[in-house]
Image: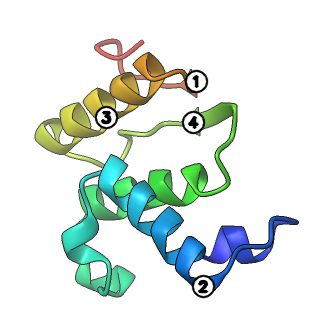
Amino acid sequence: ALPIKYSSTVLSNTALKERVMTCLELVQMTHRADHKPNQLSGGQQQRIAIARALANQPDILLIDEPTGNLDSKNGDAVMKMLSDLNAQGTTMCMVTHDPRYA
């Protein structure tokens, strides 16, 4: 919710919670909504960071090494999620050194 609170968008508490849960659903992390960052794995933290980036419904996502600190399983999951978001209309500009995802 923090990015929304710092934006110029004014939402009621109910609308704010709905937007947060929608973003968490997109990254399949609703089951971790009440967890602190140190209670999440690296892959989960990466997905939460993407949800945070989506909170204000940007037209373009600038993504720097989204899989850089992840094992191949979590990296593949993050890239599938980004691909799905792109298919839904979000424009992505990504930098990566991983030839599988380039």
Looking at the image, tell me whether mark 3 or mark 1 is earlier in sequence order.
Answer: 3
Residue under circle 2? 13
Label annotation for residue 81: 3
Q: CA distance from mark 1 to mark 2?
A: 30 Å
Residue linked to disc 4 = 63
Mark 2 or 4, closer to the camera: 2
Q: Residue at 73%, 77% (x, y): give it.
A: 5
Q: Nearer the viewer, mark 4 or mark 3?
A: 3
Identity, as a three-letter code, of the amino acid under mark 3 = Met
User: Hey, what amino acid is under mark 1?
Assistant: Met
Label of residue 65 in the image:
none
Q: Alpha-carbon distance for marks 3 and 1? A: 12 Å
CA–CA distance in space, label 1 to label 4: 7 Å
Count residues near mark 2 (Cα–Cα under 10 Å), then give few for <14, some for 14-19, many for 20+: few
Dot 2 falls on a residue whose secondary structure is helix
Mark 1 sits on what residue?
92
Q: What's the distance in space between the residues labelled 2 and 3, CA to CA?
A: 27 Å
Q: Residues within 10 Å of mark 4 (few under 14, many from 20)?
A: some
Which residue is outermost to the left? 73
Quadrant location, the N terminus: bottom right
Q: Nearer the viewer, residue 71 or 55?
A: 55
Q: Are marks 2 and 4 in contact (CB under 8 Å)?
A: no
Are dots 2 and 3 in contact, CB under 8 Å? no
Cα gap from disc 4 to disc 3, whole angstroms: 13 Å
Q: Is residue 93 above or below residue 33?
A: above
Q: Residue 93 location in percent, x, y? A: 62, 23
Name the residue: 47% across, 68% down.
18
Q: Amino acid type of disc 2?
A: Asn
Locate residue 80: give its quadrant: top left
Which badge, 2 or 4, is on the more N-terminal residue? Answer: 2
Q: Secondary structure at mark 3?
A: helix
